[in-house]
């Protein structure tokens, strides 16, 4: 249908506008074709509702138990990193990151026990940029989100965190989750 309407619409535009519109459509076509390439995370995998994790809950999924999934959190988002068992499982090089919110360690690319925390205060602009890049381009693309840390959703006094917006969270459907 678009191919029959497009020539008529382009003929009513100035040559410059028509060229820009054609270029925009071409770019959208290329982007849509590029998005058809397989993702690292399997979008056809069944969606499980996300849950709220306390520090104690998250610690149970530290990769030490063979029959349990391996979870880690970055920026308060809990990922199932079981597919990377060779990296995060028992005795693996990044096992120290599992079972906790390791935001600071990811930002600093550090396995120092003092850095294996959610606390991002005092990080440099470069470290924060690195954190955002790794969060978006590694964890969110490669591993399924299974929940959020209680600290991200609730304030220390148990009141709701006004900065947490479920509608902005991937794989989070208010209808399905609550």
Image (cartoon, helix red, strand yellow):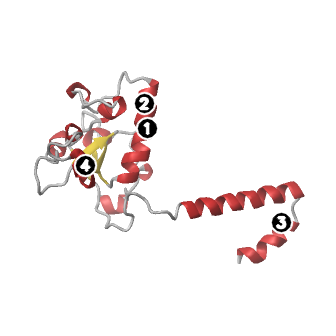
Q: Which disc, if any, is residue 128?
A: 2
Residue 41 coordinates in the image, percent (x, y): 37, 58
From the viewer's perspective, tell me whether residue 52 is left or right of residue 11.
left
Q: Which residue is mark 3?
A: 10
The local secondary structure at tag 2 comes to helix
* Mark 1 crowdedness (10 Å alpha carbons): few <14, some 14-19, many ≥20: some
- Spatial CA distance of label 4 from label 1 is 22 Å
The earlier-in-sequence mark between 3 and 2 is 3
The local secondary structure at tag 1 comes to helix
In the figure, residue 42 lies in which quadrant? bottom left
- Spatial CA distance of label 3 from label 2 is 45 Å
Q: Which of these two is toward me, 40 or 131?
A: 40
Q: Which residue is mark 1?
A: 132
Q: Which disc, if any, is residue 118?
A: none
The earlier-in-sequence mark between 4 and 2 is 4
Q: Which residue is mark 4?
A: 52
In the figure, residue 121 lies in which quadrant? top left
The local secondary structure at tag 4 comes to strand
- Spatial CA distance of label 4 from label 2 is 25 Å
The earlier-in-sequence mark between 4 and 1 is 4
- Spatial CA distance of label 1 from label 2 is 6 Å
Residue 129 coordinates in the image, percent (x, y): 46, 32
The earlier-in-sequence mark between 3 and 4 is 3
- Spatial CA distance of label 3 from label 4 is 51 Å
Compared to 116, does 92 lie above or below?
Answer: below
Q: Nearer the viewer, mark 4 or mark 1?
A: 1
Are circles 1 and 2 on residues that touch, CB within 8 Å?
yes
* Mark 2 crowdedness (10 Å alpha carbons): few <14, some 14-19, many ≥20: some
Q: Nearer the viewer, mark 4 or mark 2?
A: 2
């Amino acid at each position: 249908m678009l191919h029959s309407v497009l020539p008529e619409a382009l003929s009513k535009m100035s040559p410059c506008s028509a060229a820009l519109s054609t270029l925009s459509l071409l770019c959208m076509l290329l982007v849509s074709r590029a998005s058809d390439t397989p993702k690292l995370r399997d979008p056809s995998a069944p969606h499980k509702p996300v849950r709220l994790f306390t520090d104690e809950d998250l610690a149970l999924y530290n990769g030490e138990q063979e029959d349990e999934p391996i979870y880690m959190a970055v920026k308060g988002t809990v990922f199932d990193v079981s597919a990377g068992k060779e990296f995060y499982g028992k005795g693996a090089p990044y096992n120290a990151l599992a079972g906790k919110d390791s935001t600071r360690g990811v930002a600093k690319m550090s396995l120092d026990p003092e850095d294996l925390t959610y606390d991002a205060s005092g990080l440099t602009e470069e470290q924060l940029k690195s954190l955002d890049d790794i969060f978006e381009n590694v964890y969110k693309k490669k591993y399924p989100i299974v929940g959020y840390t209680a600290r991200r959703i609730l304030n220390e006094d148990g009141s709701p965190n006004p900065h947490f917006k479920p509608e902005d969270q991937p794989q989070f459907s208010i209808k399905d989750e609550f």
